[in-house]
Image: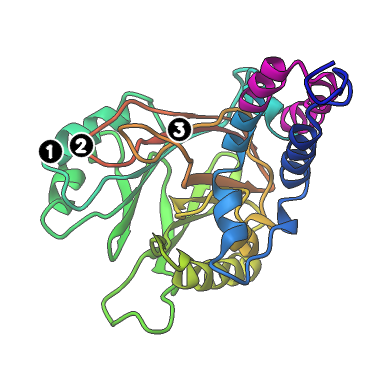
Amino acid sequence: MDARGRSAWQRGRGTAFAAALVALVLAVPAAVPNAVGRLGSLVETFLPWLGLAVPVLAALSLLRRARTALLALLLPMGVWLGQFGVLLLPGQGTAHDIVAVQHNVSDVNTDPQATARALTRARPDLIALEEVTESTRPVYEATLAGDYPHHAVAGTVALWSTFPLTEARPVDIKPAGIGSGWNRGLRATMRTPHGEIAVYVAHLPSVRLGVTGLGSAWRDESARLLGAAIAAEQVDRVILLGDLNSTVDDRGLRPVSSQMNPTGPGFAFSWPAGFPIARIDQIMTRSATVSRVASLPATGSDHLPIVARIRL
């Protein structure tokens, strides 16, 4: 009994309630409304980190010797493992048909040549880049030309491939209100021994976190435009690579993610490069499987590159 006459089973009801609330948000993040400050999207962006509430609540429960609270912690633990435990598993073997690399190289990257060389060490078949400027584009083209003879560029996004690329064209994902000259979408047909694949490269607008919440209106509108383009795609197999400024859990990306297959094991946090806490760079597929995704060592960018093994 404590000073208030409560047993170990009666103490910690508040902590137990907090554990149940964490479990609920982990299980049904859509329950968090998005109407005010895009709070739901903000929670979904960092959803895996909500699991850190478990050791904090466990410490409080042990300190107070609250058995009910300790028992309640099994709820968020179980839900977290159910949601994210698969990402801790090893990949589905080493078999793959395509290796793809995605990287926002940063428009203030001071060594684009070194960045390009670093990306080739993963021996990818596909390399998608964002924030390729007029001044750095010739450097990337010259550095990658030997191993990647096929490439396409639209605005600040670009694609290099070991396989032939045809029908390359810009994809309009520009939200209303953004000035002319903004071009961050690209689509090309890649001809492989396994057949044609439609490859999309996209860089959705950035989001901003301020006193009014998460500013993601432009990002969400751009995601809807990209989702519409993919929905209209006539080629069955699709590979999407890009800095989507969203995690796969964020409802703002749902117009895109709802059409694509789940990504395989691996958290592959990509941003910020110094201490990555979220994967906002994505490699997604339709009628194909990403069997493993991982982050690569830092380059001269504020993002980490990510690499994916894709099975057709």
**Which quarter shows the C terminus?**
top right
Report, in whole angstroms, how far the alpha carbon at label 2 lies from the one at label 3: 17 Å
Q: Is residue 309 above or below residue 128?
A: above
In the image, residue 74 lies in the stretch drawn in magenta: yes
Nearer to the camera, 9 or 73: 9
Q: Secondary structure at mark 3?
A: strand
In reply to whether residue 263 is colored magenta, the answer given is no
Q: Report x, y in % for residue 311.
A: 63, 33
Circle 2/circle 1 CB separation < 8 Å: yes
Give residue 306's position: percent from left, percent from top. Answer: 43, 35
**Could you tell me residue 63's position as x and y percent?**
67, 16
Which residue is depicted at the point 77% across and 49% down? 28
Q: Residue at x 84, y 22 (%)?
A: 71
Q: Secondary structure at mark 1?
A: loop
| Residue 250 falls in image quadrant | bottom right
Residue topped by disc 2: 300
Q: Position of residue 137 (x, y in %)?
A: 18, 53
The label shown at residue 307 is 3
At 39% from the left edge and 39% from the top edge, which residue is drawn? 162
Of the residues shown, which amino acid type is indicated by label 3?
Val
Give SS at disc 2: loop
Relative to 214, does residue 91 appear above or below in the rendering?
Answer: above
Q: Main secondary structure of the magenta part?
A: helix
Residue under label 1, please give it.
111
57 to 25, vertically: above or below: above
Question: Would you identify the image quadrant in which residue 194 lies?
Answer: top right
Q: Amino acid at mark 2?
A: Gly
Tell me the CA gap for discs 3 and 1: 20 Å
The segment highlighted magenta reads: 55-82
User: Separation of disc 2 and disc 1 at Cα?
Assistant: 6 Å
Circle 2 Cα neighbour tier, 10 Å, few/some/many (<14 / 14–19 / ≥20): some
